[in-house]
Amino acid sequence: MKKTLLLVLISAITFSLAAQKKPISGLDDFTKISFRTGGKLYLRQGSPQKVEIEGEKDTLEDIDVHVEDGKLIIEQEGMWNWGWQNNDNLRVFVTVPNIELISAAGSGDILAETKITAGNLELKVSGSGSIRVEIEANDVEADVTGSGKLEMNGVCKNLESDVTGSGKLLFDVQVAESVDLGVSGSGRIQGSGKPSL
């Protein structure tokens, strides 16, 4: 009985430590998001602008969140990490009114929880990360480099995409005017929508 209670207590403490959430205050306004580490980023378009990070204490202490030239950058501290450390337990929650760029670099995944409405929108995946998003935009540039994956659906006026390496672009998009797609390496583009793709 004592052993069972001890295990329950240890589990509760461990869960508590693993579920710390930290709001990031004092950030300048941004319209671009660059996620350069492991874990998951949950993106919502709306007001007010808000950024929170959640994870184990050690992970949160090693994450740097700042805005540079209108771009929100979430990355691993330390010049030799290059954004490739796993940090699988990291969760980032971002709410922002206007979005021009969504970039996943490294092994992190970005999930847009609301439809992203924009004039011009850039979507970029590099490394082994991924982006999943619903769009409503004029001009969309969607690029994948490395082994990552980009999944999108929605509507746009013009769509331009390049896949380099072994990555994948999967989309179901209603395109009003023009589509320009390119693949180099062993990558793959799989699309549907109008006009016929």
Image (tube, rainbow, N blue to C red):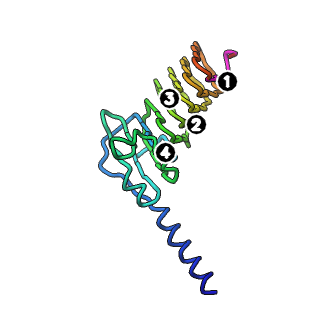
Q: Mark 3 points at which residue?
A: 123
Q: Which of marks 1 and 2 is nearer the N terminus?
A: 2
Quarter of the image holding residue 148?
top right
Q: Position of residue 177 (x, y in %)?
A: 58, 13
Secondary structure of the residue carrying numbered label 4? loop
Q: Mark 2 points at which residue?
A: 132
Residue 168 is tagged as none
User: Residues at badges 3 and 4 in contact (C-beta under 8 Å)?
Assistant: no
Q: What residue type is labelled 2?
A: Arg
Report the residue at 51% width, 40% height from top: 107
Q: Give the range drawn in magenta.
A: 187-196
Secondary structure of the residue carrying numbered label 2? strand
Please determine whether, in this image, residue 75 is positioned above or below residue 175.
below
Q: Which of marks 4 and 2 is nearer the N terminus?
A: 4
Q: Nearer the viewer, mark 3 or mark 4?
A: 4
Kindly report the distance in space between the C-alpha atoms of the residues bearing marks 3 and 4. Answer: 18 Å
Asked whether 110 falls inside the magenta stretch, the response is no
